[in-house]
Amino acid sequence: MNTHSSVMKRVAPVAIPMNEAERLDAEVDALMDGGIGWMETLGFALTTLRTNPLRTLLTTLGVLIGVAAVVALLSIGRGAQNSITASITSNGANLLTVRAGASSSGGVRGAVGDSSSLTMSDAEALADSSRNPDIAQVSPEYSGNAQLVAGSNNVNARVTGASAIYASVHNSTLAEGGFISADDVSTTAKVIVLGSNVSATLFPDGGALGQTVRVTGQQFTVVGVLASSGGSGFGSSDDGVIVPLSTAQRILFGAHSVGGSWTVSTIVTQASSAAVVDAAQAEVETTMREEHSLALDGSADNFSVINQATILATVTQTTQMLTMFLAAIAAISLLVGGIGIMNIMLVSVRERTREIGLRKALGAREGDIMRQFLFESLALSGVGGLAGLALGSAIALAVNLSGLLTTTLSWDVALLAFGFALAVGLFFGIAPARSAARLDPIVALRYE
């Protein structure tokens, strides 16, 4: 009897306090009502991806390449746009360039620059503040190309004849020496100011000041070297030289006189501010028509006015369109990467059918299963997106360091590319997730 009593004591169930049983029931009810938590679901998803790292890596390659291409191309495009903008604005702000041409002969309208219709008297009229209150400065110029020779070095460069006001209008600064003076213009002096690139070509060892440069056989003395403007093209001063206006007109290029006034190639005017550029352009056009006795409606203009702001806006718009076009092409690889994610996720659903059935049999709801597969898809695209950001940034920095192009990395580009990668992962993960969530647990458990 004592033995039987001891056995009964050993196998007797453990009594659970009433309050503890109620707490466990409440937790089970909460689990059934709320399903598996978000963090727990995320943990399941990441664990699944870590079990097959090679498949995970290959699946993310499409997204990685797409994000890297988008970041690199947008950075290069923005850098190019900034370089072009800097190149244009480095020549001066709020500029209006009056060029000869657009003349009408025999009913045929000519091209810009094909007629010598600009003179020094036109520049003097434009400089009259009573007629043109919105014009701050006027720089008459005469330009042409010439071969420059210094010792055994030579270069073909743009030679600009200018007055002393040129430096102020074009924001030119000197690295050494001085600029063209009013006395140089009045005396037709044979002095020259070299652009930084021209100086480096003709005098690679430095010491250009005081040296002699032959321009079309004429001896010129170097009085100054311009500081580098950092631009190229668009009339960059780095690749040109400047001589006195009268010297260019009468000695180098043989300008002629019209009505007792020497002709010029261009007249560059600077508006007093960016806000009045359009008003200044209207004043320039009106003054030129009055000086040339032309119809005020512009139908017979023998000159053209080039608005720097208009050029800048056009170039900016064009570069932006090209950049976005390239980025859109690069984004196609993101879509391809998304399709790859969807394919792998569908394969994963088939491989894990029994697992899904078991989880549903143990109480997992459709929402829990769907959330896990969506998290896996987002994790794949997120990892690929982060790796793509790193690779794209490295490519942009490498291009920048190469000196071929200037690139501009920005947070908005990175966020755009990464956000698009996540959106692709979410979109292409919906179909596999829905397929997994809708599996019948009984059928899934029988799946071989």
Image (spheres, rainbow, N blue to C red):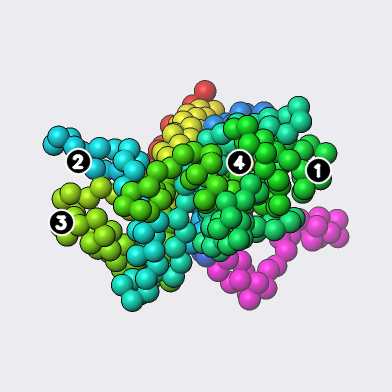
Instruction: Give the residue type that dot 1 points to.
Output: Gly
Q: Position of residue 11 (x, y in %)?
A: 76, 55
Q: Is residue 139 above or below residue 385?
A: below
2 or 4: tag closer to the N-terminus = 2
Q: Position of residue 182 (x, y in %)?
A: 58, 62
Q: Tag 4, which secondary structure?
A: helix
Q: CA distance from mark 4 to mark 1?
A: 16 Å
* Residue at the disc numbered 4: 239
Instruction: Give the residue type that dot 3 points to.
Output: Ala
Q: CA distance from mark 1 to mark 3?
A: 53 Å
- Magenta-colored stretch includes residue 4: yes
Q: Position of residue 259 (x, y in %)?
A: 31, 52
Q: Which residue lies at the image location 52% right of the left edge and 23% below the top edge?
A: 448
* Residue at the disc numbered 3: 295
* Residue at the disc numbered 2: 104
The label shown at residue 206 is: 1
Judge depth for marks 2 and 1 and give the one in front: 2
